[in-house]
Amino acid sequence: MEKADIKSMLPGEIEAVLAEMGEPKFRAKQIFAWLARGARDFGEMTNLGKALQEKLRERFYITFPEIQRKQVSKEDGTVKYLWKLMDGNAVESVVMHYKHGSTVCVSSQVGCKMGCVFCASAHGGWIRDLKASEILDQVIFAGLDLNIRISNIVMMGIGEPLDNFENVIRFLELVNHPEGLGIGMRHISVSTCGLPGMIDRLGELNLQLTLSLSLHAPDSETRSRLMPVNRRYPEEEVLKACERYFNTTGRRVSLEYAMIDGVNDSDWQAVKLAEAARRLGAHINLIPLNDVENSPLRPSRNLKRFASILEAAGANVTVRRRLGGDIEAACGQLRKKAAH
């Protein structure tokens, strides 16, 4: 019998298996709590008898990553991890420290299919989706390594979260569960480059998280140059899906916008972006472009003027702080790397 991934299971599902095994249901909560605390083997679960530990070991495996590399920014204390997964693949995640707590930026896939020209994550292509447990591990083991409580999660690392929909939703259920890490949905942000059908599915679940749309251009021609996904799912279709999401959930969408010199930073584009934000009741997050190896794109020199045009048009706008730039941990710099 092939072993199952117990960390991707909810307490009720563990209960059902325990009942089959003739074990009391209350053990499920104990097991789930141990997994959330980072137990790597059933032998660490000291309130379970040895016979049960062995039965569990025969039926299940427990995922855990190894820290292949850890870098700490000298500028702001941001920490970047390269995690080696159990199959030898590797992903990166980042922990950022703010006054309100610590935020972890997690990856959802090994590599990415989307091919956005300003982002390093697609270099080398897509390998596979991460399991819910492997996404959860980035939160658990970063917190354990730094001896901190992670209070916020952004799904803006490697991969397109909505392209790994089932595993991402299961991860959200796991990380939100009160018997586990108990991180509230309003403290979680899921980023997407714009998959309308998946945005609708997410809206129907009404999870009360924040949806962040990687827009990066207010006109379809420019967006198609930057983001190949726009050729399949045109901008207007994506914005309509975000509008439906807002109407269904009541949760304001965030528009992510990387400022690229001479590409998407003109005055007319600022005006058009403000119109899109007003239509959605959205917040605009301007991101100073970060350097990506072998990319001809450069950070905008027009950021201040662009932001002032947005503000004058009544848009709600912030300029994102650049964190972890000296360790390539900033937006667009995470990539799939080999774990040597």
Image (cartoon, grey):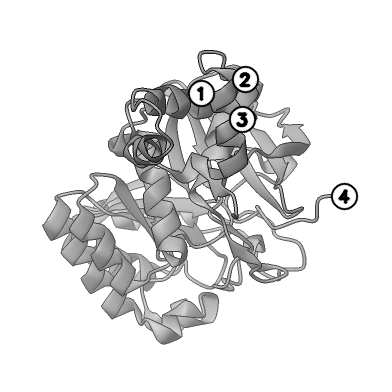
Indicate which disc, 3 or 2, sits on the residue closer to the N terminus: 2
Instruction: Tell me if mark 2 has few (under 14), some (14-19) or many (20+) residues whose alpha carbon lies within 10 angstroms of its own.
Output: few
Does the CB distance between marks 3 and 2 fall below 8 Å? Answer: no
**Spatial CA span between label 1 and label 3:** 16 Å
Q: Which of marks 1 and 3 is nearer the N terminus?
A: 1
Give the image quarter of residue 335: bottom right
Contact (CB < 8 A) between labels 4 and 2?
no
The disc, 4 or 2, on the residue closer to the chain's N-terminal end is: 2
The residue positioned 43% from the left and 46% from the top of the image is 171
Query: What residue is at 13 percent from the left and 58 percent from the top?
Result: 248
The residue to which callout 1 is attached is 34
Q: How far apart are marks 4 and 2 (CA)?
A: 29 Å
Q: Real-space Cα distance between discs 1 and 2? A: 8 Å
Residue 279 % position (x, y): 17, 64
3 vs 2, front mark: 3
Residue 8, horizontal then vertical, whole percent: 47, 45
Give the class, few, some or many, for how many residues have Cα within 10 Å of label 3's Cα (few <14, many ≥20).
few
> Which amino acid type is marked by label 4?
His
- Badge number at residue 59: none
Q: Which residue lies furthest to the right in this view?
A: 340
Does residue 43 appear anywhere in the picture? yes
Disc number lying in front (4 or 1): 1
Question: Which residue lies under the disc numbered 4?
Answer: 340
Q: Give the labeled residue for mark 2.
A: 44
Can you give x and y, in whole percent of width and height, for residue 219 in the image? 37, 78
Q: Are marks 1 and 2 in contact (CB under 8 Å)?
A: yes
Q: Can residue 106 be seen here?
A: no
